[in-house]
């Protein structure tokens, strides 16, 4: 069937074709006209205007995609039982002495000792630092730096969750460049070379292994500082999904929701690039299709591997795109009320998706269409995406509203002011003022 649209324009008025009409014409492969008469001129004019409109539109769309300079800095190794190669990788990095940063939960699970054994089997001298908390602080970093000064390492290894990797990166900043952690709040503040670092994640969440940022909390103000420098990027990310099998279900849920939020937020930021979109899409596909199965069957190595790769790709997306309002809203909740990061992110994410949908609902739809199928296959639009995230929270054992998290309503104004100051707020696709952020807290209450 051939569909025919008739466009009538007055003589001499060919330049006045509305752009919307021009775009419709641009999609036609042939423009017909009455031959030999004035209508031919009008038809040519229409075709010209159509092409012009098409070029303008293409240029406008291109401007929406940021130019980028992406230089991968981290070698990524993925595979079951890869921890055994840690010693060999340390030798390849030219190290004879290493500082191993590992949290007590991972030590108790036995992973740290296996890492120590692999290093010592390769004749690497190992000093262990484990005196830090879940959200490493400036004080924790300082303690680690003192230990580093005592053992003079040539390599840092962060073996554990985001806190171990971030703490190791923080130690690297101060040990190699001097000063205190606060001196590196922001981007590109380190002037001296830094030590090579191997990250061995045991959770699937932060994606710290593929980022050049260390998240360190100021011990006095409780503000979470993002300290970034390309020199702080890990030399190697050693992804061994077997290490994630021992995660408690609650940790799996908290870190999994965080990783999912990373995929969703990075896909829509104002600084997204074609490169970051590629990582966000693949991260979303892996995380959305494996989070449910890994909660149902925590011993599934396939589901664990999917989550670990998804979190890693989401980390690469953050490195190339940044995050948005969900993280801006989550950080003050952690600082003020001690909410675990994944819980704070999970409770805010559905509300931010709905808020952003006015600006970029079609981008969320793109992610839905690019998913793995399953229960998400029939979902349409940002509202349903937000609903899916909301329903995931109780399944993951997380609370759905701020009141249940112990947040006090009278603190929301102050929290909103703190959220507005967060760096990631500036990258949200729809601008957010303190009033907007307050409204989002109220919706989540
Ligand atoms: Fe996060």
Image: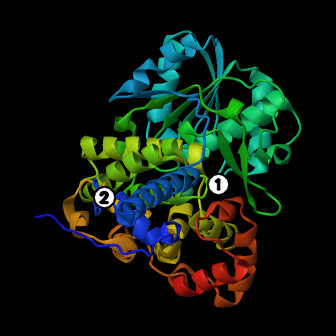
What is the tally of numbered marks visible in this picture? 2
Circles 1 and 2: CB atoms closer than 8 Å: no
Q: Foreground: 77 or 32?
A: 32
Q: Quadrant of the C terminus?
A: bottom right
Figure check: 77 above or below 444: above
| Rendering colour mode | rainbow
**Mark 2 neighbour class, 10 Å CA radius: few under 14, some 14 to 19, many 20 or more:** some
Q: Foreground: 322 or 53?
A: 53
Some atom of ligand 1 lies within 8 Å of the CB belonging to the residue at label 1: no
Q: Foreground: 214 or 19?
A: 19
Which of the four quarters of the rendered structure image does ligand 1 lie in? Answer: bottom right
Residue wearing tag 2: 31
Where residue 241 sits, quadrant-wise, is top left
Q: Foreground: 113 or 332?
A: 332
Where residue 130 appears, x then y in whole percent? 63, 40
Where residue 260 appears, x then y in whole percent? 43, 57
Q: Residue at x 65, y 23 (%)?
A: 196
Q: Residue at x 52, y 77 (%)?
A: 355
Marked residue nearer the N-terminal end (1 or 2): 2
Camera-side mark, 1 or 2: 2
Q: Residue at x 61, y 85 (%)?
A: 439
Q: Quadrant of the N terminus?
A: bottom left
Residue wearing tag 1: 135
Q: Is residue 74 left or right of residue 45?
A: right
Q: Secondary structure at mark 1?
A: loop
Where residue 220 appears, x then y in whole percent? 83, 61
Q: Secondary structure at mark 2?
A: loop
Q: Is residue 27 left or right of residue 211?
A: left
């Amino acid at each position: 069937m051939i569909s025919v649209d008739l466009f009538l324009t007055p003589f001499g008025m060919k330049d006045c074709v509305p752009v919307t009409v021009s775009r419709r014409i641009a999609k036609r492969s042939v423009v017909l006209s009455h031959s030999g008469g004035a209508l031919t001129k009008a038809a040519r004019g229409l075709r010209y205007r159509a092409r012009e409109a098409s070029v303008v539109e293409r240029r406008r769309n291109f401007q929406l995609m940021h130019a980028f300079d992406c230089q991968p800095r981290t070698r990524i190794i993925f595979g079951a039982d890869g921890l055994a190669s840690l010693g060999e990788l340390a030798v390849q990095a030219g190290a004879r002495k290493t500082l191993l940063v590992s949290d007590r939960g991972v030590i108790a699970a036995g992973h740290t000792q296996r890492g120590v054994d692999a290093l010592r089997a390769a004749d690497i001298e190992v000093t262990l630092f484990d005196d830090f908390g879940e959200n490493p602080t400036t004080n924790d970093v300082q303690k680690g730096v003192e230990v580093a000064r005592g053992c003079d390492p040539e390599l840092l290894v962060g073996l554990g969750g985001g806190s171990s990797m971030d703490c190791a990166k923080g130690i690297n900043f101060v040990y190699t460049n001097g000063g205190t952690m606060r001196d590196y709040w922001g981007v590109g503040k380190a002037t001296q070379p830094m030590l090579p670092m191997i990250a061995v994640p045991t959770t699937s969440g932060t994606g710290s292994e593929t980022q050049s940022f260390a998240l360190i909390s100021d011990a006095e103000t409780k503000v979470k500082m993002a300290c970034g420098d390309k020199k702080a990027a890990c030399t190697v990310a050693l992804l061994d999904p077997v290490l994630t099998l021992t995660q408690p279900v609650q940790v799996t849920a908290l870190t999994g929701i965080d990783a999912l939020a990373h995929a969703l937020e990075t896909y829509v930021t104002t600084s997204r690039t074609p490169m970051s979109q590629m990582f966000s899409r693949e991260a979303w596909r892996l995380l959305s299709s494996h989070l449910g199965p890994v909660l149902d069957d925590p011993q599934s190595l396939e589901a664990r591997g999917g989550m670990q790769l998804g979190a890693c790709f989401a980390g690469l997306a953050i490195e190339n795109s940044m995050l948005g309002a969900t993280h801006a809203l989550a950080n003050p909740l952690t600082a003020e009320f001690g909410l675990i990061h994944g819980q704070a992110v999970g409770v805010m994410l559905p509300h931010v998706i709905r808020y952003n949908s006015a600006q970029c609902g079609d981008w969320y739809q793109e992610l839905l269409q690019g998913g793995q199928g399953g229960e998400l296959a029939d979902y349409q639009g940002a509202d349903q995406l937000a609903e899916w995230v909301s329903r995931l929270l109780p399944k993951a054992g997380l609370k759905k509203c701020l009141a249940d998290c112990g947040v006090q309503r009278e603190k929301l104004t102050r929290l909103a002011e703190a959220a507005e100051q967060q760096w990631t707020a500036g990258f949200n696709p729809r601008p957010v003022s303190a009033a907007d952020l307050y409204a989002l807290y109220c919706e989540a209450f």
